[in-house]
Amino acid sequence: MPTARALISPLSLPLLLLVTTSAAPFAAAQSRSSPAPDTQFHTSVVDVPPPAPDLNANGDASKGSDIFIRQMYENMARERGIQRHKLIVAQSAQLLALAKQLNDDIAKSNKDQLPVPVVKEAAEIEKLAKSIKSKMQETD
């Protein structure tokens, strides 16, 4: 195995001596002028401010945003209630019209026998009445 001297050429020896001799004073001067690396940045602890008081529990939205979202849901619920009320009013008007028509059809029919369309009409009225009842019982 070749020795270290055999690997260094005669021309590279002066270059190697120049690098080693010039680097030593620089390293010594640097170690005297700066503090130790482990104490250089530990002069103060970085203070992280606490979350602002207007942040919610997740820390991602402010109370103002929460209030806005709550108001938005309340407005949506109010709109659903208005739409449900309009539907109930329309279905009640339809129920009233069907009930009047059923009353007229029963008055025209024979007292001993009811026609099949009148019985189907009564079933439709019952179905509509149950639908109205279930819509009235819904809550948001």
Image: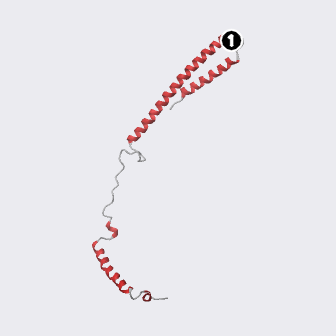
Left or right of 8: which side holds 122?
right
Left or right of 133: which side holds 78?
left
| SS of the residue under disc 1 | loop
Left or right of 101: which side holds 45?
left
Along the viewing direction, whichever of 113 and 45 lies nearer the viewer:
113
x, y (%) of residue 43?
Answer: 30, 63
Task: Residue at 28%, 76% (x, y): give it.
Answer: 29
Q: Which residue is mark 1?
A: 109
Q: In the image as oriented, which residue stretches furthest toward the front?
A: 11
* 39 in relation to 89, above or below: below
* 22 in relation to 140, above or below: below
Categorize mark 1 by other alpha carbons within 10 Å: few (<14), some (14-19), many (20+): few
Task: Residue at 63%, 22% (x, y): give it.
Answer: 124
Task: Residue at 65%, 21% (x, y): give it.
Answer: 123
Residue 92, picture quadrant:
top right
Task: Residue at 38%, 40% (x, y): give it.
Answer: 64
* 63 in relation to 114, above or below: below
Residue 68, picture quadrant:
top left
Q: In the image as oriented, which residue stretches furthest toward the right?
A: 112
x, y (%) of residue 79?
Answer: 47, 30
- Mark 1: which amino acid? Ser
The mark tally for this picture is 1
Along the viewing direction, whichever of 133 and 72 lies nearer the viewer:
72
Left or right of 112: which side holds 27?
left
x, y (%) of residue 129?
Answer: 59, 22
